[in-house]
Image (tube, helix red, strand yellow):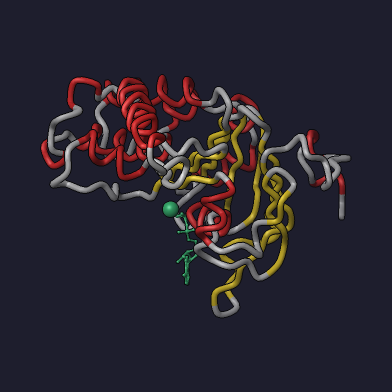
């Protein structure tokens, strides 16, 4: 491999290094010979917010599909806390602590905010006899805590269908948070949100990275500037550039791709 082509922080990276929460290496998937993701490598640290940007069709959503196991890689590796994910099923990947939000919210419209959060609470922790009471209290506390984080504390008894578009997005983030994933992946979370909702979403993401990392796909550059620790730019299935927003924004390769669109 030509080291000159790699972003500086990757040079010398040891694949066995467990200090990365997520290590994606030489990840490739072809659909009928078309490489939607082509030899992609990147590394996410604990407590990092990484944003993936790139033109439509760059392969961003496919990268998330590969990490969460919805799509199987043709080759390459995805290590999460040192554990290889490419061999695991979607549900085993969730169990391992990877949560993923899709572009359209999948909340239950006819349930309340509280009920939506409750059904997402992980089952089977303590379900026997006297422990049920303890668990109920634990679930209630956790629902309140998460509702507060997602700005829906006053809407707990409201049916989800009456929430605004932005509030529905927050609720779905809450349904993931209640499972306490160590890696949270969000595909265009602020699409269709008002400016005020975008600012609050940035606040939310900056809060929830205590104890976890977030991988976000986003187009809104103001939002990216507000949240990204580092940015990975994808183009035609490959990593075009990577680094701080400042660095990526001034990269001539990135400017060329964005001006061309
Ligand atoms: P982005 O999210 O960056 O806009 P995608 O990851 O959705 O891009 O898509 C990347 C490319 O892969 C596109 O050309 C898309 O048509 C193609 N693609 C994605 N998923 C599939 C699939 N399941 N089968 C065939 N082609 C796909
Ligand atoms: Mg996409």
Q: Is residue 24 above or below residue 118?
A: below
Q: Where the N terminus falls, by quadrant? A: bottom right
Q: Residue at x 68, y 54 (%)?
A: 78
Total marks shown come to: 0
Front-lying residue, 118 or 101: 118
Q: Residue at x 65, y 62 (%)?
A: 86
Q: Is residue 77 above or below residue 55?
A: below
Q: Residue 236 at what x, y percent from top left?
A: 57, 58
Q: Is residue 221 left or right of residue 175?
A: right
Front-lying residue, 49 or 246: 49
Q: Residue 199 at what x, y percent from top left?
A: 35, 21
Front-lying residue, 95 or 78: 95
Q: Is residue 194 left or right of residue 183?
A: left
Residue 138: image quadrant is top left
Front-lying residue, 157 or 245: 157
Q: Residue at x 84, y 41 (%)?
A: 13
Q: Is residue 42 left or right of residue 182?
A: right
């Amino acid at each position: 491999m030509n080291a000159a082509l790699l972003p500086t922080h990757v040079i010398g990276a040891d694949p066995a290094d467990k200090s990365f929460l997520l290590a994606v290496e030489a990840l490739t998937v072809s659909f009928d010979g078309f490489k939607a993701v082509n030899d992609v490598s990147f590394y996410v640290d604990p407590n990092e917010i990484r944003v993936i940007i790139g033109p439509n069709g760059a392969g961003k959503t496919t990268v998330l599909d590969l990490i969460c196991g919805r799509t199987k890689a043709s080759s390459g590796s995805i290590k999460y806390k040192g554990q290889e994910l490419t061999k695991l099923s979607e549900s085993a990947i969730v169990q391992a602590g990877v949560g993923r939000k899709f572009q359209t919210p999948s909340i239950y419209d006819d349930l309340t905010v509280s009920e939506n959060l409750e059904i997402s609470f992980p089952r089977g922790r303590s379900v026997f006899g006297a422990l049920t009471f303890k668990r109920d209290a634990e679930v209630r506390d956790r629902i309140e805590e998460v509702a507060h984080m997602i700005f829906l504390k006053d809407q707990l008894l409201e049916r989800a269908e009456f929430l605004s578009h932005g509030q529905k997005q927050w609720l779905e983030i809450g349904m993931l948070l209640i499972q306490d994933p160590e890696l949270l992946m969000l595909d265009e979370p602020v699409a269709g949100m008002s400016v005020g909702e975008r600012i609050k979403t940035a606040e939310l993401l900056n809060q929830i990275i205590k104890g976890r990392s977030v991988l976000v796909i986003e187009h809104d550059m103001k939002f990216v500037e507000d949240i990204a620790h580092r940015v990975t730019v994808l183009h035609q299935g490959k990593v075009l550039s990577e680094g701080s927003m400042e660095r990526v924004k001034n990269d001539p390769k990135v400017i060329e791709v964005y001006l061309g669109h």
